[in-house]
Image (cartoon, rainbow, N blue to C red):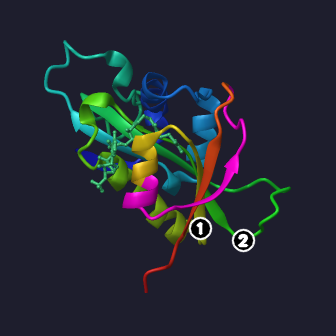
Amino acid sequence: ITIRQATIDDIQAMQNCNLHNLPENYQLKYYMYHILSWPQASFVATTYETDLEGIDQDTISQPKADTAYIRPGEKVVGYVLGKMEDDPDAKDKTPHGHITSISVIRTYRRMGVAEKLMRQALFAMNESFNAQYVSLHVRKSNRAALHLYRDTLNFEVISIEKSYYQDGEDAYAMKKVLKREE
Ligand code: ACO
């Protein structure tokens, strides 16, 4: 498995991965907005499929014809979509990042892929955009993700946001302070 920065060529595969794994879905233009605005903040986990016939074509990155680096058979098995907070009305003016979405396809879970994606995104947001901390929301019932954030990555729960999700479920708002490595 390779972890690399996500590019515009990956957004279709990232969206498909998201559709398979989460009820919170986004239009392609929202992925594009992330990648164009903060190219260092989003990553994909990829693997090469040798059997190109038998696989779900939706999960393959679709390079444009004129792209210099065409990677036939590269399959996106996970992604993290990150951004810097850019809401002019945000109360906290300290530069900080936000994890919009992360998921890993079922057959590649419990192998450390999400942890690697998160660590890369947190490091890059701090390095490239001087993010002082990173925030995210997670469903109260999402045990796997909570374990990843709280126990593996040392995020803290800041508050509970009532009925944050469309189906009425509450979210934990979580945060991790980042320290620049000298
Ligand atoms: N139950 C308990 N702990 C778990 C589980 C689980 N089902 N899955 C992973 N963990 C733990 C691991 O044991 C590991 O802990 P460790 O440091 O003790 O070994 C840690 O979480 C990280 O595990 P990874 O292998 O890196 O996680 P994985 O690649 O399996 O991905 C993820 C975790 C992204 C939550 C995956 O289960 C998934 O895609 N779920 C569906 C989508 C989802 O819920 N995304 C998060 C929504 S919140 C948001 O996007 C901001």
Residue 164, image quadrant: top right
Q: Is residue 64 left or right of residue 106?
A: right
The tag on residue 133 is 1
Query: Percent position (x, y) of residue 113?
Result: 30, 47
Q: Decide if residue 104 is in sight here.
A: yes
Whether pointer 2 and pointer 1 mark residues with C-beta atoms closer than 8 Å, the reply is yes
Residue at the spot x=58%, y=27% of the render? 25
Q: Give the amino acid type for the residue marked by disc 2 in the picture.
A: Thr
Q: How many marks?
A: 2
Q: What element carries label 1?
A: strand
Q: Which quadrant would the C terminus be assigned to in this image?
A: bottom left
Residue at the spot x=26%, y=35% of the render? 108
- Residue 43, compared with residue 109, is above or below; it is below
Separation of residues labelled 2 and 1 (CA atoms)? 9 Å
In this rendered view, identify the residue nearer to me: 76 or 168: 168
Q: What element carries label 2?
A: loop
Residue 51, image quadrant: top left
Residue at the spot x=61%, y=29% of the render? 26
Highlighted magenta segment, given as a residue range = 149-166
Q: Which quadrant would the N terminus be assigned to in this image?
A: top left
Residue under numbered circle 2: 94
Q: Is residue 161 magenta?
A: yes
Query: Percent position (x, y) of residue 34?
Result: 60, 45
Determine whether the beta carbon of the residue marked 2 sits less than 8 angstroms from the nearest atom of ligand 1: no
